[in-house]
Image (cartoon, rainbow, N blue to C red):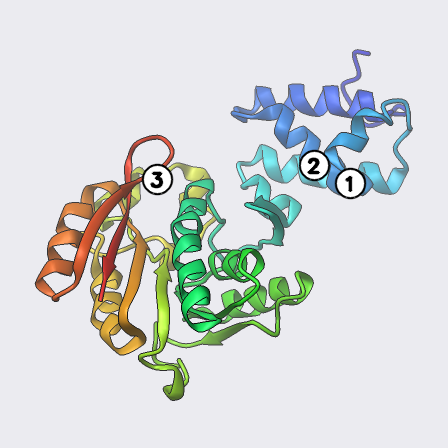
């Protein structure tokens, strides 16, 4: 069908084809994926269900929702903000403007944490995790979801992030083991928990300020600079996290932090100067340096 407007009766097949073509013409790098997610949002069907309901007509309300989603996506707004959710590891979580969109690369932060949590549970029956700069909460929530004996304290300075992380915890049924606290890094961590954490995890702002202007417009124009800009060398927040590590971690507790690939050697040197041991730079799935890991 060579449909070019929303004036005709449209089936799911028609809507998928037109949306893909339109977004492709607007420069969307993944137009089919965007079309599937936008149509799923409009119809309430999963992406798989779309393909077994090809001939179902869209209602006027569904067409209105799709039209608005296409309009926003065509202007460059990230798909995750348009649909209001993102699939991340074994979860689907809510995302919204003002809070950083979780990236697939960050999933390896949790992957690195899993065996350490398992070891803590085997030794003490519980794994205590502190997730600083939690954003939407995905790192801490994944830890709690994938390790049933984990308890997570998550912090963020942005109130909208704490509200969102708390909503995601409730939706996942993890609110009993995941607590989101609005504060500057570790300032709001309960005093009785200081020195008891097995793991200190963070995906902090880490883009060097000089590189902020090179970010794609989809990131720079829509995502919060507060969650991206790491200062002149990208390590402003990391230095503060490293300073807090001895107060938060138990003896032999581990810090794992995601950082910019150009900053990891300097971060490793900072960890060694701070008396951390077993310092290691870890790669992501593409082989690029992505994480720093160090033990108290």
SS category of the residue bearing label 1: helix
Q: Contact, CB < 8 Å: mark 2 with mark 1?
A: yes
Q: Which residue is mark 1?
A: 42
Residue 231 falls in image quadrant: bottom left
- For the point 91% across and 29% down, which residue is it? 57
- For the point 56% across and 72% down, which residue is it? 177
Residue 292 spot, x, y in % from top left: 25, 51
Left or right relative to 46: residue 21: left
Q: Distance of mark 2 from mark 1, alpha carbons? A: 6 Å
Q: Distance of mark 2 from mark 3, alpha carbons? A: 25 Å
Q: How many marks?
A: 3
Q: Is residue 142 above or below residue 52?
A: below
SS category of the residue bearing label 3: loop
Q: Which residue is mark 3?
A: 215
Q: Distance of mark 3 from mark 1, alpha carbons? A: 30 Å
Residue 128 falls in image quadrant: bottom left
Residue 106 spot, x, y in % from top left: 42, 47
Q: In the drawing, what numbered circle is on residue 38?
A: 2
Q: Is residue 23 visible?
A: no
Residue 237 falls in image quadrant: bottom left
In the picture as drawn, the residue positioned furthest to the bottom comes out as 192
Q: Is residue 268 above or below residue 1?
A: below
């Amino acid at each position: 069908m060579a449909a070019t407007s929303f004036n005709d009766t449209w089936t799911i097949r028609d809507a998928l084809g037109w949306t893909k073509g339109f977004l492709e013409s607007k420069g969307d790098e993944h137009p089919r994926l965007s079309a599937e997610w936008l149509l799923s949002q409009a119809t309430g069907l999963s992406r798989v269900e779309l393909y077994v309901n090809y001939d179902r007509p869209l209602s006027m309300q569904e067409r209105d929702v799709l039209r608005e989603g296409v309009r926003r996506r065509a202007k460059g707004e990230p798909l995750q903000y348009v649909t209001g959710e993102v699939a991340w590891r074994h979860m689907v979580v809510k995302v919204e403007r003002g809070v950083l969109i979780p990236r697939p690369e960050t999933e390896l932060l949790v992957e690195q944490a899993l065996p350490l949590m398992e070891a803590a549970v085997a030794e003490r029956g519980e794994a205590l995790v502190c997730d600083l700069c939690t954003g939407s909460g995905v790192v801490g929530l994944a830890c709690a979801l994938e390790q049933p004996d984990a308890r997570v304290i998550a912090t963020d300075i942005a109130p909208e992030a704490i509200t969102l992380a708390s909503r995601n915890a409730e939706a996942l049924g993890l609110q009993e083991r995941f607590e989101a606290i609005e504060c500057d890094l570790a300032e709001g961590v309960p005093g009785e928990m200081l020195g008891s954490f097995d793991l200190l995890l963070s995906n902090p702002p880490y883009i060097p300020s000089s590189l902020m202007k090179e970010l794609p417009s989809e990131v720079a124009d829509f995502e919060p600079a507060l969650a991206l800009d790491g200062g002149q060398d990208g390590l402003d927040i990391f230095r503060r996290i490293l300073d807090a590590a001895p107060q938060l971690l138990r003896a032999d507790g581990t810090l794992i932090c995601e950082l910019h690939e150009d900053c990891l050697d300097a971060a490793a040197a900072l960890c060694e100067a701070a008396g951390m041991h077993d310092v290691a730079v870890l790669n992501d799935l593409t082989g690029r340096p992505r994480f720093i890991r160090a033990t108290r």
